[in-house]
Amino acid sequence: MGYIPDFLTPSVTSGGLAGALDEVRATPRGRLTHELTRLAESRPLPSWVSSLNRPGAKALGALTRALELSCKTLLEPYWPRIQTAIANDVELRSSTLLDGGTSALLNTLRPHARWHAPVLEVEYPVDRELHLEGRGLLLIPSYFCWRRPTALADPALGPVLVFPVTKQPLEIVRASKDGLERLLGRTRTVVLAHLATHGARTTSEVASAANIALPSASYQLGVLRDGGLIASHRDGQYVRHSATPLGLRLLDR
């Protein structure tokens, strides 16, 4: 993925499509010039793009009308499905936050990101560092984000991390009664189901519930964690494990 001008991804969190388009329409000329110049350095631009930041030009208004039309034509028919996916993702991650705290929440971003306090390491197409400097990080699940998370290019803007929303898993997994067990194996399925039902559990509690040895429990938990199906966080002298949104979705919870 190449550079995308930040003015095309407004940070408005209310007002819906109309509010977002108003913010795009109100982009200052100086910012337009800076971001379009940077875009031109990475790819050839059509001639009409150069008119976006001209005084009194109507091109920016035409651009927002085109964005509005494309959203209504391409997205509106599927909007209820998209909203449901986003709402489910937010609900599941909020439950993880309440159950395990910030560390557990950030660990749900695996395998796209890994939390090594105080640093969140994210798979990203270029090497860069973003220092919060006391600012909060806004996490945004996106239905159209794929492969890896993304962030605003300008570090001076509010810190944002857009990550792939947890979508419904492949139906083939649940095509038969033992579909998930065939995919993960019986032991890992039992471990994942136990965490999904009972919330955060220690390795010893998982071993006891699954009737397996402690080393085996550690191994199975590691496989599930590397697959993004569970998250682990330290709580005093213990490490507690909980199912991630992806794990819950796989179980159809």
Image (tube, rainbow, N blue to C red):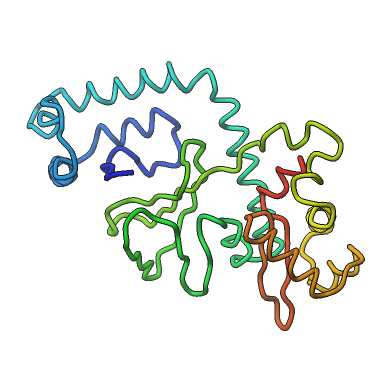
Nearer to me, 28 or 187? 187
Residue lying farthest to the left in this orientation: 55
Q: What residue do we see at 54% from left, 22% from top? A: 78
Is the N terminus in the top left, top right, bottom left or bottom right quadrant? top left
- Position in image of residue 47 (x %, y %): 10, 26
Q: What residue do we see at 69% from left, 66% from top? A: 222
- Position in image of residue 151 (x %, y %): 38, 51
- Position in image of residue 59 (x %, y %): 16, 24
Nearer to me, 99 or 39? 39
Quarter assignment of residue 251? top right
Q: What residue do we see at 34% from left, 66% from top? A: 129
Is the C terminus in the top left, top right, bottom left or bottom right quadrant? top right
Quarter assignment of residue 177? top right
Q: What residue do we see at 40% from left, 50% from top? A: 150
Nearer to me, 116 or 96? 116
All told, the count of numbered labels is 0
- Position in image of residue 223 (x %, y %): 69, 61
Nearer to me, 237 or 33? 237
Would residue 171 be found to the left or right of residue 198 on screen? left
